[in-house]
Image (tube, grey):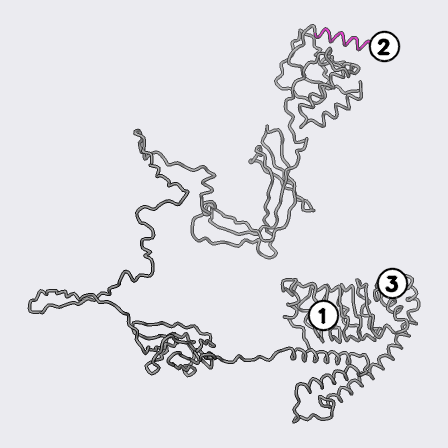
């Protein structure tokens, strides 16, 4: 029997980083599970649960899964629908190929508001007469039954005959339950008989008779053939027996595939010439030292410190040494013959290492030539003491016996040639100070620019704090349910005329939109700049707040990041500056597309303007001169030209005004007239005379037309 364990669920939650508390989809199919348990406690957020191809007999321990939408229990041993009233979000239930015979048990699905699909294909209840109509009438919210859409006409007809259908279904269900009880009793009796027999089908088992593997295989083949040829009813009990037989066959095949572990034969000597081999079954570290001065081998074996000495066995032979460590052999071959009787073995009381000293039989000596002995006589201060003779011996080495080159003179110490193809760099002499140079200590040293000072400054200097350890306080924004939050605002462009002495405004909309209005200094050409953007939540970003007055350093969590972009300036935010004064236009040089002249305004001081203008610091005209300005005499065609020139010169700021002027030009004589202050000077008399004649001519033409 396979039980649902936490390790099993966690292995199936690899797609959720092995987190089972937030798991939404879980697949436990083909696991030989016989009971549903623990899932309603460990995985409360489950939405999809796959439990098909198991041995589950009862629907249980799923009522707490309030978010469960799809439950797959196909190919199990379920006999009735139950314990699903608490699955409020259940949308689809798959019970294909089960043993559901109590069709009236589907009434537990009536109160599930979102339930739409039910699969009962392959169950005994589908053989009942009127099965489909009964299910449709019992579950009014059902949209699909066994993969087929439910028609509205079918539902109406089923509801009309519901009382008759219910009575018929209950009778058929009662007959099935009676038959099922008899089958269950027969299966129980048959199972008891099989348990009473031997493994070969006999009433006894001969434990004394031995059987070979071939006989076992033949007996297994016979048993397997008899099992599959036996005729049984399709019941939950027979399905369990089939599963147990298949599990047994699987285990037998696995044992057959497993090769018996063959222990390697220990080879301590070479088969050809009988030389000892190096063996380290214990896998311990060791070192061996050839002490030529004393003519002996020293073996240091790193035996475990707390290993009892009684578990060690050392054996020194003339050409090898063998140590048995807790039944495992360590053997080492020696180059020279050693004396076994003179060898010693000692164990360190500190490290536990085993040290074996093995003297050599033939002590090799180094052939050497001795120089003549020099006797050095040292007189003593006390003449009564005889002088001491010190004899020194030096090893004489023949230089011709060297087989290695002398590496001491490979590189010349004095002078080294440069590599091929390179030029030696000549040393540039340091320039001497000028004769009039004076080292004045009062002159301050050179200072770096501010930007380089910031680059060269350390982190404490940039933060404005002292070096050393500081206490870091975790702010209230990290607490659960805290109302304090911090935001970061970033903008793409900042005008140089922003007034830092005035307050800006921030507007946050319901949809997360943010609008920031920044005022400008007076005389900059605009009153304010508007930034617009959106805010997005932050998860792993913080801000460090340093209070230089109290010395407190706090770490706060950033909640949102606001990214702003500068919008186009509003025409209402522009400040109209002094426009260019109107330039007099000679009517004789007007464009060929001349229109009819416009009637002048009754007021002698009126000027037809194409856009609102303001004049500052204008000189007043002389009272003795005529009061009619020359601009009032111009025709509509000339005014169109002036409007075009003025609109071209201020295309960036007066597009709306030029559009209104074009509409005025198309209207003809219905244009509006606007008053303006006096002009800076008077036109020449001859020019005014020409304008007055043109004015009279235009008036006469208007009278004729009337």
Q: Quadrant of residue 66?
A: bottom right
Question: Does residue 703 belong to the magenta stretch?
Answer: yes
| Stretch of the chain drawn in magenta | 687-706
From the viewer's perspective, is residue 403 above or below residue 326?
above
- Closer to the eye: label 2 or 1: 1
Q: Extreme front residue here?
A: 400
Question: Looking at this view, is 539 or 439 the one in front?
Answer: 439
The residue lying at 67 percent from left, 69 percent from top is 41
N-terminal of the two: label 1 or label 3?
1
Q: Which residue is mark 3?
A: 150
Q: Which residue is mark 2?
A: 704
Q: Position of residue 115 (x, y in %)?
A: 80, 64
Q: Is residue 629 left or right of residue 157?
A: left
- Closer to the eye: label 2 or 3: 3
Distance between the alpha carbons at the discs numbered 2 and 3: 89 Å
Question: Looking at this view, is 312 or 701 the one in front?
Answer: 312
**Residues at discs 2 and 1 in contact (Cβ within 8 Å):** no
Q: Is residue 97 left or right of residue 286?
A: right
Q: Residues within 10 Å of mark 2 (few under 14, many from 20)?
A: few
From the viewer's perspective, is residue 439 above or below residue 38?
above
For the stretch drawn in magenta, what is the main secondary structure?
helix
Name the secondary structure under disc 3: loop
Q: Position of residue 256 (x, y in %)?
A: 65, 79
N-terminal of the two: label 2 or label 3?
3
Q: Quadrant of residue 28?
A: bottom right
N-terminal of the two: label 2 or label 1?
1
Q: Which residue is mark 1?
A: 29
Question: Looking at this view, is 312 or 461 the one in front?
Answer: 312
Q: Position of residue 290 (x, y in %)?
A: 35, 72
């Amino acid at each position: 029997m396979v039980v649902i364990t936490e390790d099993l669920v966690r292995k199936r939650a690899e797609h959720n980083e092995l987190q089972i508390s937030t798991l939404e989809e879980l697949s436990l199919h083909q696991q030989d599970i016989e009971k549903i348990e623990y899932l309603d406690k460990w995985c409360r957020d489950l939405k999809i649960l796959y439990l098909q191809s198991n041995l589950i007999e009862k629907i249980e321990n799923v009522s707490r899964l309030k978010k469960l939408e799809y439950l797959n229990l196909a190919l199990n041993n379920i006999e009735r629908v139950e314990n699903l009233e608490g699955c409020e979000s259940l949308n689809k239930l798959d019970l294909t190929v089960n043993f559901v015979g109590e069709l009236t048990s589907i009434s537990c699905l009536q109160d599930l508001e979102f339930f739409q699909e039910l699969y009962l294909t392959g169950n005994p209840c589908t053989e009942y007469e009127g099965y489909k109509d009964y299910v449709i009438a019992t579950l009014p919210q059902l949209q699909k039954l066994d993969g087929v859409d439910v028609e509205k006409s079918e539902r109406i007809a089923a509801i009309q005959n519901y009382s008759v259908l219910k009575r018929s279904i209950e009778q058929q269900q009662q007959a099935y339950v009676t038959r099922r009880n008899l089958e269950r009793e027969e299966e129980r009796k048959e199972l008891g008989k099989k348990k009473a027999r031997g493994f070969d089908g006999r009433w006894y088992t001969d434990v004394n008779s031995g059987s070979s593997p071939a006989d076992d295989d033949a007996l297994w083949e016979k048993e397997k053939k008899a099992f599959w040829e036996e005729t049984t009813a399709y019941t939950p009990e027979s399905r369990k027996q089939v599963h147990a037989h298949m599990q047994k066959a699987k285990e037998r095949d696995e044992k057959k595939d497993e090769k018996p572990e063959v222990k390697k034969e220990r080879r301590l000597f070479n088969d050809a010439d009988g030389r000892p081999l190096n063996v380290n079954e214990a896998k311990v570290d060791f070192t061996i030292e050839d002490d030529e001065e004393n003519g002996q081998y020293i073996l240091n074996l790193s035996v475990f410190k707390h290993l009892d000495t009684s578990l060690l066995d050392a054996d020194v032979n003339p050409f090898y040494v063998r140590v048995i460590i807790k039944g495992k052999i360590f053997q080492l071959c020696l180059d020279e013959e050693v004396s076994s009787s003179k060898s010693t073995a000692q164990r360190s009381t500190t490290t536990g290492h085993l040290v074996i000293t093995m003297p050599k039989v033939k002590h090799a000596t180094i052939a050497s030539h001795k120089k003549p002995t020099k006797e050095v006589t040292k007189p003593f201060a006390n003449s009564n003491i005889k002088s001491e003779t010190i004899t020194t011996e030096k090893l004489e080495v023949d230089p011709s016996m060297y087989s290695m080159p002398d590496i001491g003179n490979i590189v010349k110490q004095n002078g080294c040639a440069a590599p091929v193809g390179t030029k030696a760099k000549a040393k540039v002499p340091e320039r001497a100070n000028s004769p009039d140079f004076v080292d004045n200590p009062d002159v301050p040293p050179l200072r770096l620019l501010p930007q380089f000072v910031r680059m060269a400054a350390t982190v404490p200097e940039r933060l404005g704090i002292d070096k050393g350890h500081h206490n870091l306080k975790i702010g209230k924004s990290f607490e659960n349910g805290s109302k304090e939050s911090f935001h970061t605002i970033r903008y793409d462009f900042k005008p140089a005329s922003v007034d830092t002495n005035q307050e800006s405004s921030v507007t946050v909309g319901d949809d997360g939109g943010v609008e920031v209005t920044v005022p400008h200094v007076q005389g900059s050409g605009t009153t304010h700049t508007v930034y617009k953007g959106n805010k997005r939540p932050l998860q792993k970003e913080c801000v460090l707040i340093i209070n230089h007055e109290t010395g407190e350093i706090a770490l706060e969590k950033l909640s949102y990041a606001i990214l702003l972009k500068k919008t186009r300036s509003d025409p209402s935010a522009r400040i109209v500056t002094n426009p260019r004064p109107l330039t007099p236009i000679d009517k004789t040089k007007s464009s060929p597309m001349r229109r009819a002249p416009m009637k002048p305004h009754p007021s002698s001081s009126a000027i037809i303007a194409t856009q609102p203008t303001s004049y500052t610091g204008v000189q007043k005209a002389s009272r003795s001169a005529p009061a009619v300005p020359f601009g009032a005499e111009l025709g509509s065609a000339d005014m169109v030209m002036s409007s075009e020139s003025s609109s071209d010169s201020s295309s960036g700021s007066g597009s709306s005004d030029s559009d209104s002027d074009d509409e005025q030009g198309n209207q003809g004589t219905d244009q509006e007239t606007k008053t303006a202050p006096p002009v800076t000077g008077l036109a020449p008399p001859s020019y005014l005379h020409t304008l007055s004649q043109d004015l009279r001519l235009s008036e006469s033409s208007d009278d004729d037309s009337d």
